[in-house]
Amino acid sequence: MSDPALIEGRGLGAVRGERVLFQDVSLAVQGGDGMVLRGANGSGKTTLLRQLAGLSEPQAGTVQRTTNHHWIGHSNGLKPHETPRSHLANWARVWGSEIEVEDVLLQMQMHRPADVPCRLISAGQKRRTGLGRLLLVPRDIWLLDEPFNALDADGQALLAGMIATHRAGGGAVIAALHGTAPIEVSDEVVL
Amino acid sequence: MTLPSPLLSAFRQALSEAWAGGAGVLLPFGFFAGTAVLVPFTMGSDPDLLAKIGPGVLWLALALASLVTLERVFQADLQDGALDLWVQEDGSISQIAAVKTLAHWLISGLPLVLLTPLLGMMLQVPATQTVPAMVAYALGGLTFFLWGGVAAALSASVARGGLLIALIALPFYLPTVIFGTLALDEGLGGTSILFLAASTLFALGVAPAAMGAALRLAAD
Amino acid sequence: MLPEFDKNAAFIWAIIALGIGLPILLAIYAGLRARLARRRLERLREE
Amino acid sequence: MWSILANPHRFMAFSRYAVPVCYAIGTALFGWAMYQALWVVPSDAYQGGDIIRAMFIHVPSAWLCMGLYLGLAGSSFVWFIWRHELADIAARAIAPIGAGYTALCLATGSIWGKPTWGTWWLWDDARMMSVLVLFFLFLGYMALRAAMETRQKAARAGAILAMVGAVNVPLIKFSVDIWSSLHQGPSVIRAEGPAMAAVYLNPLLISFLGQGLIVAAMVFTLMRAEVFGQQADALMARRLSEG
């Protein structure tokens, strides 16, 4: 372990009601890593990922992040009245991004429905829009919850490519996945 | 002074959300006008009676408007995942919640202030009370929205939380209603308008922190 | 034996009945809940 | 490592004896106060005659409501800062008792009001309004907790609400006082404070102490119920996960 970990969880545990979802989970990722969280439905993959993102309060253990992260959850964070363009432009403003939203739309192949309100576009298109946020500002950690859901083959290849580029540039990815992962996995945590 | 960009963006987003969610400001205008029009039919058209109850009815309409509007605000954020994104903005979720509440007050609360001269005339509110009423509705509406926002944030994860919000928010609305009603009688020179302003400031100080904590819980 | 009041006797007795009765009801409620919870725990432990 | 599920053994050992002791001393003190109230204390012509005897029930219940809400807010605060499990158990136990005593206070006040004011309910009385607000605060607290999915979430939401409520109570009280002072509503009890004659004050304080101990015993009992229930739930969950 030469580099300090980008993100590290020590002795994490989660309790729902009286039920212990998982306990004593420790993990760490460095730049270039691609970690996959696996487990049956209800095993707490999402909860673990949310604890790493600082969204859920761990009932035991600590999380340390040395840098900022991107979060892609089950829901894409789109408002029904927003268009893909206005959504990305809004978050570009929030994060002070210099990148042209137009370029991101092109890269996500969302330039055609870019001005259609999100309540009218398909689930896959919504997901592509949400994933477009990853490109707005470079952040070393990507936390992705079932990112391949709702994407067609084309979209899956696109995302796999994005992840590969991100890791080649020294970034790390932690993804909760079920089924086969279309990405190269460097580490696996099974709950 | 410029607002930090997350707050400005949150404000813009909330404003467009409130605008899109209710056919612009047409809906709140219609709601207040409709309430005012119903009153004479339910209570009788006696001018003295209307002058007495008119301002109070408008307070009630304002409180209702805040409860009905806020029910969906944070719940929608939770369901579409936007709340996750806001919570992760470093430490500013309280301010963002305040800014969102402010935006919704602008769209759904402020119309009553603008309508007051007209509705007041229709409900026989004495002309001397018009200006105090506008000030009081502005301050009081903001306070309603702030405390209502706390209740809404607390019950964001509750399906059909509307009744719960009303029950939770009720005690917090009381000082506003009391000072607001008294301020209308006393006018701008009285002490009640100062108390009302003070309770608005108090809400501005306390409610955002509570909303922030509640939204963190809702996202958890 | 009972004291006699000048007036409002019904009101005074009503208040006293409430003041004694409601705490008794609350105590019974608390005791019942504790007993039920304890019995459930013991049954679970025996299994 | 699961301090959250740890049995609060010391509380259980303590409360086992504390509950009967509190009930016994509380009942004795309350009984003595009631004896004083009904047979010993003189009737007060100025206060509307024998109705003053109801004060020994009504006034302590009002004080207890405030005390219980303070207790709720205090334990919520402790839970929120230190996440001490027992504090949340206390908050959960206090709420229904608090709601019960606010209801008692409102009911007895209303019955007292009928001969004094000539009406069951007077919106201008500041004390009654304050207790009514407390009643709604307790109700809202219980409703919010009941609506939450898990125990942890209920504890967090409840704590936030109780603390926000506690900082608002002075403002609410102040506004209600102003409201009633303008309407000059007659108050049920006028002779409060240190000026009250010792014949009244001593039984009043003893009654408060007795009722307070009884309330403490009830809260401890409900806390025991919560601890038992939590242990049973944990046991069930463990069985389920073991299959």
Image (tube, rainbow, N blue to C red):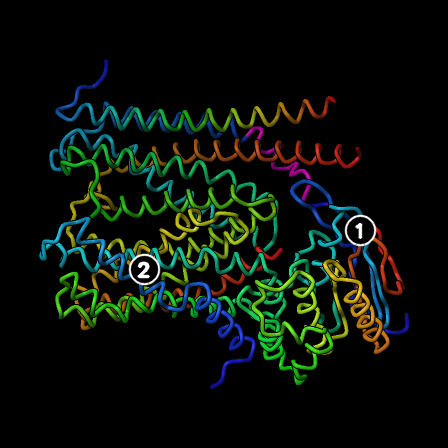
Same subunit: marks 1 and 2: no
Residue at the image position 21 percent from the left and 39 percent from the top: D121
Q: Which residue is mark 1?
A: A24
> Which quadrant is the C terminus of chain D positioned in?
top right
Within 10 Å of disc 2 (Cα), the crowding (few <14, some 14-19, many 20+) is some
Q: Percent position (x, y) of residue D239?
A: 75, 32
Q: Percent position (x, y) of residue C35?
A: 57, 24
Residue A106 as seen in the image, left or right of residue D46: right
Secondary structure beneath label 2: helix
Residue B7 as seen in the image, left or right of residue A126: left
Q: Amino acid at mark 1?
A: Asp
Question: Residue A68's image quarter?
Answer: bottom right
Chain containing the residue with disc 2: B
Q: Percent position (x, y) of residue A162?
A: 80, 72
- Which segment did they paint magenta? D4-17
Q: Nearer the viewer, residue D64 or A55?
A: A55
Q: Amino acid at mark 2?
A: Phe
Chain containing the residue with disc 1: A
Tell which tag, 1 or 2, sits nearer the viewer: 2
User: From the viewer's perspective, is residue D68 above or below residue B180?
Assistant: above
User: From the viewer's perspective, is residue A131 above or below residue A23?
Assistant: below
Q: Which residue is mark 2?
A: B31
Question: Residue A133's image quarter?
Answer: bottom right
